[in-house]
Image (cartoon, coloured by chain):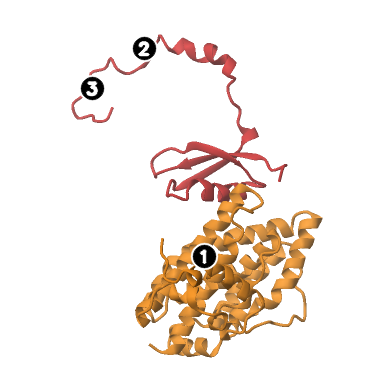
Chain colours: A red, B orange
Amino acid sequence: MRDWPLYEIFIRSKNGLNHKHVGSLHASDPQMAIQNARDVYTRRNEGVSIWVVEANHITASNPDDAEVLFDPATDKIYRHPTFYELPEALKHM
Amino acid sequence: MQQEIKDFILMMADNSMILGHRLGEWCGHGPVLEQDIALTNIALDIIGEARNYYAYLAELEGKKEDDYPMLRNERLFKNVLLVEQSNGNWGDTMMRQFMFDCWHYFHLEQMTNSRDERLGAIAKKSIKEANYHLSFSSKWVIRLGDGTEESHQKMQNALDSLLPYFDEFFIPSDFESYCYNEGINPDLNIVKTKAKTKFNEVIDLATLSLPQNIFTKKGGKSGIHSEHLGFILTEMQYLQRAYPGVTW
């Protein structure tokens, strides 16, 4: 069991919403990961769909690169669509 | 209501109750946290199903739900011998569960058409859970049977020692024959055919071999139990026996 890979677990809480990362667990194979996730993360009606991804298949950005990657966006307010006049008919924008 | 029908309801209840208690013994001892939770989930599912049957009987007889699991002696329990067998190792527990699930799922499937509406409703509610249990235990039997040399051997041992208890499910007792004629209990031949097809398919995928010339052990349905049940009841009934009527 010590060799069981780590799986990252994503749960869709309602149809129409996106899958959200909820945590991780160990399992011997993807089917077991889904069953484990079902028992650990959805026992109180938290979900309608489960994705599992072996953690080592996820490529993550390096926290050290955060400045380079994300800071340039902070002063570009024109990228936010807040300068447009929206027609009355459009709700929830 | 006819005694035979009550006996049938008791058998359904006791099968789930006693196995649920056995699974509960794993609580805190599972091989990993997730399996510990998985097994207690299953335990709660089937104890919940048992409660539905006991509550039905209690209404019919003007008794309390707890009277049945907590205040009867072992000769009055009608569960099959399989469900009272020891947990053994994880593989033994999974093999026992798999045999139970094969019967349970297909029995409930047929029982959804019971002429007794209440039993049909319980079957419809429980079959979703039973479906999951069957998928859970099947995957474990395959995973371990077709796993390492050691896990394969352990599953083969589990199959060899538990198979003699499997067929009791499908040998109708007098009360089941009565209920079948009344359209209350499913045809056990149909249940058996479907359960065995699934069973053999999984055993095959698990690369296990079925032992030949087994001697079927039975008696539970008529109250003749193995030595284990007394010990289970001693623990399970302790509180109600020591403090009659206690609630929390």
Name the quadrant containing residue B42.
Answer: bottom right
SS type, badge 3: loop
Discs 2 and 1 lie in a common subunit: no
For image coordinates 41% across by 70% down, the residue present is: B245
For image coordinates 58% across by 22% down, the residue present is: A61
Tag on residue B147? none
Q: Disc 2 is attached to a residue of which chain?
A: A
Give the position of the C terminus of chain B as an image quadrant.
Answer: bottom left
Residue bearing mark 3: A86
Name the quadrant containing residue B135.
Answer: bottom right
Q: Of the two numbered discs 2 and 3 on the same chain, state the one appearing first in sequence.
A: 2
Residue bearing mark 2: A77
Q: Position of residue B153 (x, y in %)?
A: 79, 62
What amino acid type should be assigned to the residue bearing mark 3?
Leu
Q: Can residue B116 be spotted in the picture?
A: yes
Residue bearing mark 1: B130
Q: Disc 1 is attached to a residue of which chain?
A: B
Can you say whether B35 is above or below B107 in the image? above
